[in-house]
Amino acid sequence: MSVSKADRLERALEASWPAPDYAEAGAFRVGRAGADPALGAAALRSRDAAWQDEDLQRAFDLHASWQQPPIFRLADDADPALVAALTQRGLQPAREMRMLAVGIDRLTTQPVPRVTSFAVWPPLAIQRDLWAEMGLDAARQAIMDRVALPKSAILGRTDDRAAGVAFVAASDGLAVLHALEIVPSLRRQGLAGWMMREAGFWATAQGCDRLCLAVAADNAAAIALYRKLEFQDAGGFRYFAPPGTRL
């Protein structure tokens, strides 16, 4: 069976930022949330998977057994009947995400200036400290540690100090970027762009042809950066969750 580009990208996103455990619920695959509530989202195993009401109930039951809120991840073009079924069960549209992708060759046209960015694994202590300072605590950093793919931590430097961090992993010819953070006082100096280019060079060495990521649809500043780097829309999805759920 052929896999659509959107399914391939979603699978790469999941493999590069995985839940601690997964279970099948008919047409759905449900994650155990762990440190990140979004990792507990149930999603169709493929965008065209046929679901039934009993599959939906099994997914809700799995969420309950794991003592986590019933969160679902639906593609932009999700079945309206599925949206209606979730709404009837009390779930509401929550965070909307856009998937963006760029050809690696677009990122590797310029060499990264010396001592501006590095790709290393395992992360240096300063990288872990920066992530922690910007809200990515040890439990969420552990998500990166369990990724079973080629991976690297990108370090960015400006003004003679470590100022940015990101995580990148390679899956099925796609490099996927997560957890890009820049020290607030040192933003808008172009460092994020150089870090993305460093990730591009790393991805080339892994045999990848595209660099991909998911970004909140309302994160205008990040989307503007990615557009400047020639990222193109590659689809999207939205979470459905009980009112008040934090994602």
Image: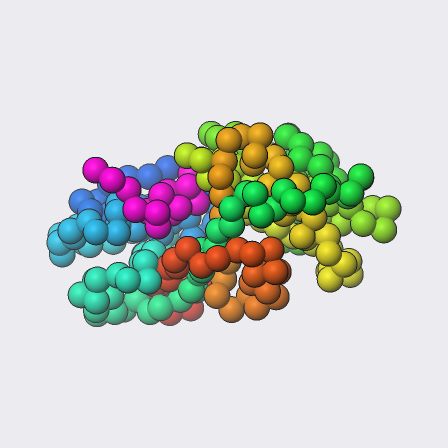
Q: Quadrant of the N terminus?
A: top left
Residue 14 appears in which quarter of the rendering? top left
Q: Is residue 172 visible?
A: yes
Give the magenta range. 1-15
> Residue 41: x and y, percent?
35, 52
Q: What colour scheme does the image use?
A: rainbow
Query: Viewer-proximal residue, 209 or 178?
Result: 209
Question: Is residue 238 on the magenta stretch?
Answer: no
Instruction: Tell which residue pokes out farthest to the right in this image.
Output: 160
Task: Give the residue at x 43% y 45%.
Answer: 13
> Residue 105: x and y, percent?
56, 43
Q: Is residue 67 visible?
A: no
Task: Give the residue at x 56% y 56%.
Answer: 230
Q: Is residue 67 above or below residue 2?
A: below
Query: Viewer-proximal residue, 208 or 181?
Result: 208
> Residue 190: x and y, percent?
73, 56
The reply, left or right, for residue 112 in relation to residue 207 is: right
Q: Magenta stretch: dominant SS?
A: helix
The reply, left or right, for residue 213 in relation to residue 116 is: left
> Residue 66: x and y, percent?
33, 46
Task: Give the residue at x 72% y 41%.
Answer: 111
Task: Give the residue at x 66% y 41%.
Answer: 198
The reply, left or right, for residue 126 in relation to residue 229 is: right
Question: Is residue 8 on the magenta stretch?
Answer: yes
Q: Could you tell me how many numbered marks the image carries?
A: 0
The reply, left or right, for residue 29 in relation to residue 114 is: left
